[in-house]
Image (spheres, rainbow, N blue to C red):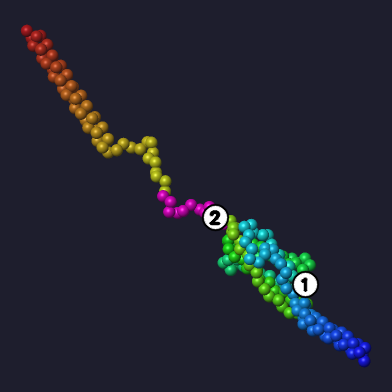
Amino acid sequence: MGGRVARAARTWSVVLGAALGLSVLLPAAPAAAHNSLTGSDPKDGARVATAPKRIELRFLATPARDTTKITVTGPDNAPASSGVPTFSGKQVAVPFTPGPAGRYTVAYQVTSTDGHEVHGTLSFTLTTGAPAATPTAGPASPTSAPPTPVAPTGSPASPVAAASSADDSGGTGWLWALGAVVVLVALAAGLLLRRRSARR
């Protein structure tokens, strides 16, 4: 009698153990089929001084190429990624185009093996922004002052100087005329004196 009870107890313990094991494993099976993010570079919440060349995401399962979408936006909500994603097993990488310093957000969408879509985001802070482009030199401004004209070396004399020169020449001519009159008077007086002396 005691042996039967012992055997029945052992049987029921095995059955209960199996039932408990199934109750634990069955709910976990659908969850295991869902993909999820396991890591990234840069890490979520990281602060980096040097901008990475690409953003890398690692997943629990291999993501499907045709349904995986990854976008990166900068602090001004402008796109910060160019090019197509590259796949390597469970890892996906997208090229990173850095902009100004600030927070960058990475949004991803992957499809699980059961067809369930998994969405998520992570962010990191870039402490040093990309250098600004140097503006090219444009044409000269039309408002710039024209060059000051230089007077030619052979420019005519000013009216004042011309008048002064005319005055000087006029004064010199008057002196010459007065001298000629004196000479004529002296010659005339000499001739008169000679005539008088000849008559005597």
Which is nearer the eye, 87 or 127?
127
Q: Secondary structure at mark 1?
A: loop
Look at label 1 and name its amino acid: Ala
Residue farthest bottom in this picture: 1
Residue 19, quarter of picture: bottom right
Q: Nearer the viewer, residue 158 or 90?
A: 90
Classed neighbour count for the residue bearing mark 1: other residues with Cα under 10 Å, few (<14), some (14–19), many (≥20): many
Q: Main secondary structure of the magenta part?
A: loop
The magenta segment is 132-145
Q: Quadrant of the C terminus?
A: top left
Q: Secondary structure at mark 2?
A: loop
Q: Which residue is painted at 65% across and 69% down in the image?
A: 122
Does residue 22 lie above or below 53 as drawn?
Answer: below
Instruction: Return the residue found at the far top.
Output: 200
* Magenta run includes residue 144: yes
Q: Quadrant of residue 128?
A: bottom right
Residue sitting at x 82%, y 82%: 21
Q: Amino acid at mark 2?
A: Pro
Residue 66: x and y in percent read 75, 73
Q: Which residue is mark 1?
A: 61
Q: How far separated are the C-alphas under marks 1 and 2?
A: 47 Å
- Relative side of 183 to 18, left or right: left
Is residue 76 rendered to the left or right of residue 191? Answer: right
Query: Does the image show residue 26?
Result: no
Residue 198 within the magenta-colored segment of the rendering: no
- Kindly identify which residue carries mark 2: 135
Give residue 87's position: percent from left, percent from top: 76, 67
Which residue occupies 22% across, 27% down? Answer: 172
Residue 172 shows up from this direction: yes
Q: Residue at x 52, y 54 (%)?
A: 138
Q: Nearer the viewer, residue 72 or 17?
A: 17
